[in-house]
């Protein structure tokens, strides 16, 4: 009886292994049929990350064999690093979970942000819909400051959207390397809430994408309610020539490299990715479907109607960009870490508070 029971259990295990192997070997068109693909967006509705995620979700299904349902799930927190960590650690690795997260996610890993719990090189990159250009703006009725130079002389309160977000990282950089006096008021989930706070007078400044301003805040531009004083693109946008680019900043060659590094994050932009270990054939199907979506006449017509840019980049090219970011030169990394107060003891083993660093945060 005991041998018989053991034999039965062995058969069950063998049968389970066969079923699992059959599922893994299932062709992508059969696998995706009837499935729901969730796109986890690291920000609340209302911003450009969410806008691109929802546009992709509307048009991507018809280009995937089996026509699965594609839905967007918002998962804000820690400047979208909450969604990044979830995607890497907990999301299904079968192609049914994708993400749209902050463009600086590989840079935050390179700078050893303690909130990072992923290896950016191991994400499955599907493709980029557009490069990005984040802008920093003040509400003209609440502060006389109109430029970075003026922000060196007078404190400006600015809405923060998480420690891994551009909205907090760039003011910290300019404070440390340029001498500005931005005071970050944290606790806002995303740029949409930050802009509402600015409009209400809770803060004097905020950050969002240039796309979000052009699409959703045309009256702010028309009625001169705001002044844009900085943009993060490597060069000034053709339709935003008044505001300096991040790559124009820096008093020393080392500082210029740090600012240029953050400007280069714009190349990753609004990208779609998945967790590690998605089967290669499914990654190919998703990449092909994404590329087809970027060429879809209806998708392009919708983008034109919304006045948002479409600048596609392949998943393979995105992965190369991420690898380049992770290969950060030590001198630049140390300078950036110093600016953020993340400098280390010499054995690189422990995060230190700025006042305890052996290397001065401002003199790396």
Image: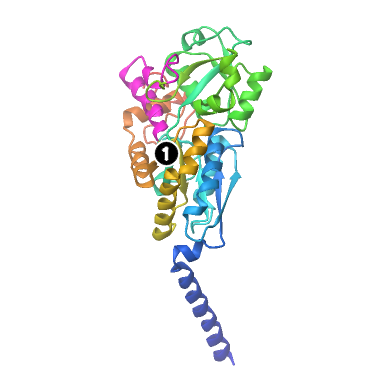
Task: Tell me the quadrant of the picture where the N terminus can be found.
Answer: bottom right
Q: Main secondary structure of the magenta part?
A: helix
In the picture of the structure, the residue carrying the numbered disc 1 is 106
Tell whether 249 sits left or right of 169.
left
67 vs 207: above or below: below
| Closer to the camera in the image, 147 or 354 | 147
Considering every residue shown, the one lying at the far bottom of the view is 1
| Closer to the camera in the image, 47 or 246 | 47
Q: Residues within 10 Å of mark 1 (few under 14, many from 20)?
A: many
Image location (x, y in percent) of residue 20 = 49, 71
Task: Tell me the quadrant of the picture where the C terminus can be found.
Answer: top left
The quadrant where residue 236 appears: top left
Image location (x, y in percent) of residue 104 = 45, 34
Query: What residue appears at the point 56 percent right and 91 percent down from the top-left corner?
Result: 4
| Closer to the camera in the image, 31 or 302 | 302
Q: Magenta region: which residues?
A: 239-267
Considering every residue shown, the one lying at the far right of the view is 200
Tell whether 331 sits left or right of 226.
left
Query: What residue appears at the point 34 percent right and 41 percent down from the top-left corner?
Result: 323
122 vs 168: above or below: below
Helix, strand or loop under label 1: helix
Q: Is residue 247 magenta?
A: yes
Query: What residue appears at the point 46 percent right and 26 percent down from the top-left corner?
Result: 340
Q: Is residue 266 magenta?
A: yes
Q: Is residue 62 visible?
A: yes
Image location (x, y in percent) of residue 140 = 59, 11
């Amino acid at each position: 009886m005991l041998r018989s029971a053991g034999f039965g259990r062995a058969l069950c295990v063998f049968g389970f292994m066969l079923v699992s192997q059959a599922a893994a070997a299932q062709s992508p068109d059969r696998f995706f049929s009837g499935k729901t693909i969730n796109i986890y967006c690291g920000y609340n509705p209302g911003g450009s990350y969410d806008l691109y995620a929802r546009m992709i979700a509307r048009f991507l299904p018809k280009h995937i064999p089996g026509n699965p349902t594609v839905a967007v799930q918002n998962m804000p927190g820690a400047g979208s690093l909450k969604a990044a960590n979830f995607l890497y650690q907990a999301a299904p690795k079968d192609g049914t979970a994708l993400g749209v997260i902050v463009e600086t996610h590989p840079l935050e890993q390179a700078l050893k942000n303690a909130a990072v719990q992923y290896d950016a090189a191991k994400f499955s990159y599907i493709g980029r819909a557009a490069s990005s250009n984040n802008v920093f703006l003040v509400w003209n009725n609440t502060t006389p400051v109109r430029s970075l130079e003026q922000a060196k002389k007078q404190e400006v309160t600015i809405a923060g959207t998480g420690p891994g977000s551009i909205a907090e990282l760039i003011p910290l950089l300019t404070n440390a390397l340029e001498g500005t006096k931005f005071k970050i008021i944290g606790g806002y989930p995303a740029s949409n809430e930050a802009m509402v706070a600015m409009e209400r007078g809770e803060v004097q400044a905020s950050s969002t994408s240039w796309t979000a301003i052009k699409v959703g805040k045309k009256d702010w531009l028309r009625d001169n309610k705001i002044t844009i004083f900085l943009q993060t693109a490597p060069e000034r946008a053709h339709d935003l020539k008044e505001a300096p680019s991040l790559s124009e900043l820096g008093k020393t060659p080392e500082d210029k490299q740090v600012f240029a590094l953050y400007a280069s994050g714009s190349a990753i932009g609004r990208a779609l990715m998945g967790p590690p270990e998605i089967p290669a054939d499914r990654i190919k199907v998703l990449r092909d479907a994404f590329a087809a979506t970027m060429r879809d006449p209806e998708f392009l017509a919708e983008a034109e109607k919304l006045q948002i840019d479409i600048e596609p980049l392949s998943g393979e090219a995105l992965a190369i960009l991420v690898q380049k970011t992770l290969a950060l030169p030590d001198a630049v990394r140390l300078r950036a870490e110093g600016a953020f107060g993340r400098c280390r003891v010499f054995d690189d083993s422990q995060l230190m508070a700025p006042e305890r660093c052996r290397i001065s945060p401002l003199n790396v």
